[in-house]
Image (spheres, rainbow, N blue to C red):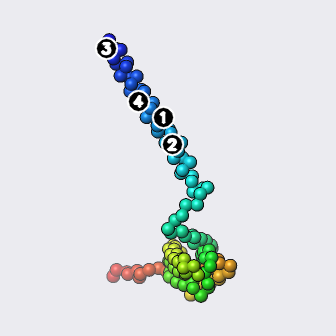
Amino acid sequence: MWKKRNNDKKNNIDDSINELLDAWMDMLSISLPMANMNDWVEVPSKKKTNAMSYEDRDKDIVFTIDMPGVAKKDIDISIEEHSIKVTAQNEKGRNYNYTRRFKPTVDESSAVATFKNGVLDITVLKVEEKDKGTKVNIK
């Protein structure tokens, strides 16, 4: 009788585990397609941004940004030794705000920007890094 009770308990546990696994598999079958939902449905976002592409070439760095609906006069670009910032607003009130840090040291005064068909291209020449600080010899 004791063996029969243990077998009954074991079967009940096995049945419970199987029910739990079945429920879990059902949930997975629903959630997996949902994980790829962005592939077939555009989900609205509060902050939709176009990425700034960055190409580090031998002698220069090129940044490219798609900025549809923006007028050239509304674009502000600032460059420092290791960063670039681009801001603008299009006619529909959409704000563009891009900041990018980069390792190579650049000559800020060499920057050239072109804007054609809503695409901003910025090219900046790289310079050799200067040694920072001064070596002090001990007497």
| Quarter-of-image position of residue 42 | bottom right
Identity of the residue furthest to the left in this view: 2
Which residue appears at 61% of the width and 85% of the height?
72
In the drawing, what numbered circle is on residue 2?
Answer: 3
> Marks 1 and 3, Cα distance to the nearest angstrom?
30 Å
User: Looking at numbered disc 3 in the image, what kind of residue is underneath it?
Assistant: Trp
Residue bearing the label numbered 2: 28
For the N terminus, the image quarter is: top left
What crowding class fits label 3: few (fewer than 14 Cα within 10 Å), some (14-19), or many (20 or more)? few
Mark 4 vs mark 2: which is more N-terminal? 4
> Could you tell whether 99 is left or right of 70 in the image?
left
**Which element is circle 2 on?**
helix
Camera-near label (4 vs 3) is: 4
User: Looking at numbered disc 1 in the image, what kind of residue is underneath it?
Assistant: Asp
Residue bearing the label numbered 4: 16
> Could you tell whether 89 is left or right of 11 in the image?
right
Which residue appears at 54% of the width and 64% of the height?
44
Mark 1 vs mark 4: which is more N-terminal? 4
Which residue appears at 41% of the width and 81% of the height?
133
Residue bearing the label numbered 1: 22
**Which element is circle 3 on?**
helix
